[in-house]
Image (cartoon, helix red, strand yellow):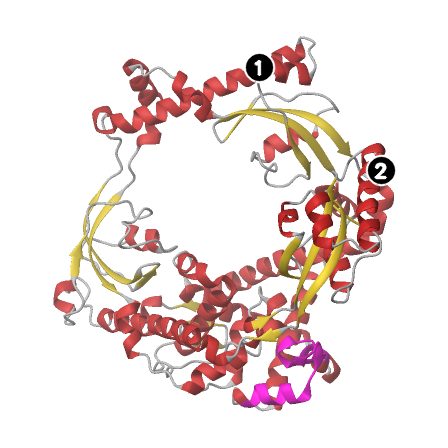
Amino acid sequence: MLNTFRTKIKFWSHVFLWPVIVSFIAFYGWSFLDRPEETSAAAVIGDTEISWRDVVETRQQLHRYYRQMYQENFDRLAGTLDFNEMAREQLINRALLTTAANDFHVTVSQQEVQNNIAAIPAFQRNGTFSPSAYQQTLARMGMTPAQYEASVADDIRLEKTRTLISSAAPVTEDELKERFIQQNVKINCDYIQFTMPQFKEKVTDDPAAVEAYYSAHLDEFRVGDQVMVEYVQFDPKQYEKDVELFDEDIEDYYDRNFEKYQVPEKIRASHILINVESDADEATEAAAKEKILAALTRVQNGDDFAEVAKAVSECPSSSSGGDLGFFQKGRMDPAFEQAAFKLEVGELTQEPVRSRFGWHIIKKTEYQEASWKPLEEVKKEIEKQLREEESKILVMKAAQHVFDKVEPGVSRLSDLVKDKTLVVQTSEFFEPGVPPRVIGYAQNLQDILSNLEEGEISIPVETISGVFLFQLKATKASFIPPFEDVKDDALTKYRNHAASELAQAEAEKVRQAILAGKSWEEAVTEFSAESKNTGDFTRGLSIPSVGGNEEIINELFELDAGAVSPVYEIRKNGVLFRLASRNDFDQDAFEKEIPRLRQQVLRSRENEIVSTWLEQMKTELAHEGRYQLNSLADLN
């Protein structure tokens, strides 16, 4: 049931997942099911063969890793990932890096291995390396320390090889400045936004205008190439009953994932708050502090904390005497949290605490130590998860078993499916990239269906709805439907378009009023708009609370203080900005950040350079006839 460690570790040694490897390396190499029988190699890279056995095993580990990471969102994500291809690619990259490590004569010291292992949380107790935890974890996984340490050394060796490959390119000061500017130079804008829905009622439904819109935007109505398929769905739920689980399987999972079931320490606290903005002027700040000090004096003189909170506090919790209930670290304002956790139960902060919300008096009322949920409490949850995971492996095997019987150009799905629980169905025409709900989405679905010949049966395809085999029945070329067929859709699109133009026109009126001499405030009031503020933002992907794109953001960064922007269409709304403030490049701050920036640039460059190097190696080996990828249809 347990596999050797070296094959287990391959997933976690994937070249692009190194930052998370050491945290999970001890946990994800275990499988309930026997490995598949060996068939032809999945890939040949130089003198190295990658077996289908390793690909299947790595694919299963990928499943577990992503399920652990995304939990309840995993099923939605899974349909967007080609786990077979990901697994093979990871193994190929590892093989190439191993060859390079041999060529570069890369070595690893015993001290490096020890330091690496000591930093892995799985082998720690109370934040410190525990020899007993180390031995127990390895024993549960059927490994010896020698096996484990050899594999860790191998991973460190590959990471060193990555560094060697990427170390040739220097980091220039201009690169460091560019990264510093991206992260630290910020602007702050006031803005008004007239939304498209505000103007929908002002749009007149003019049939001629709707048809004109259709004629001018024909590609918006285009239907892409379509397919009609026969298909059979293998539902993982139907295979859950065939998964054999033992108590030791559940216990092993619990032990390997004990951190998942940790209940962090919590405290219960009450507070009295006097609200004051973080950018308040001195007079407002002083007045707020005077109020909180008066409240503190009352409590220190013996007044009941809860009664003072009800009378003085400006937080909604005042109605319950300031009680905030239990909370763990990371849930409150950092300054508030730090002060609250330092207190003893029953203790009061002796000085007001300033947070971004204002001034607080805090009283710690209860404390709960960190603990773990007992196995019995989570046993059913673990059993359900393991059963779901392993049923997906069974369902892929079942689909592959049917596919193995396919005779190209001869077989029909209806002849191949003998299981009475499986029903061959026929779809309507649909675009491969927009499958019916019953089929669900998969990243590779569009490519697979688009490349089928009529009558051809696809390899097993895993979507968010299960595993499918498809047989192409017919195709229909892309076309633009006549106006009469899309009249309702055209009307909706026209209304949205016209309302968006009205919203932009209204924003332009505000802009013109400002250009004519009115202040921002005057123009905003005149047109009954609401001025909002973006807060500080960098040259990122979006403007906080607004949206936008890189081009708009770059234009805003070019504005002078107090200047207004053009009117932009953002999410079909009309938006006008005024540059409120800017913090420009700070040479002193830049120089302090150079070491951190250099590490960031090196790391991002390492990934890029190593990725390029790997592709070059594959190309060279392919030219030499020493790089072969076999069809994923060979997977069984």
Residue 322, percent from left and from top: 67, 52
By secondary structure, the bulk of the magenta-drawn segment is best described as helix
Q: Which residue is mark 2?
A: 286
Q: Nearer the viewer, residue 387 or 262?
A: 262
**Furthest-top residue in this view:** 516
Residue 449, percent from left and from top: 28, 53
Q: Residues within 10 Å of mark 2 (few under 14, many from 20)?
A: few
The disc at residue 184 is none
Q: Which residue is mark 1?
A: 527
Segment colored magenta: 115-139
- State left or right for residue 381 relative to residue 345: left
Q: Reply above or below: 470 against 60.
A: above
Image quadrant occupied by the C terminus: bottom left
Amino acid at dot 1: Phe
Magenta-span inclusion, residue 97? no
- State left or right for residue 40 relative to residue 582: left
Q: Nearer the viewer, residue 67 or 413?
A: 67
Which residue corresponds to the image point at 40% horizontal and 78% vertical from the top-left?
Answer: 53
Q: N-terminal of the two: label 2 or label 1?
A: 2
Q: CA distance from mark 2 to mark 1?
A: 36 Å
Amino acid at dot 2: Ala
Q: Nearer the viewer, mark 2 or mark 1?
A: 2
For label 2, the SS is helix
For label 1, the SS is loop
- The reply to whether residue 173 is visible in this rendering is yes
- The reply to whether residue 169 is visible in this rendering is no
Which residue corresponds to the image point at 40% horizontal and 22% vertical from the top-left?
Answer: 200
| Among the 4 quarters of the image, the one containing residue 97 | bottom right
Which residue corresponds to the image point at 62% horizontal and 69% vertical from the top-left?
Answer: 264
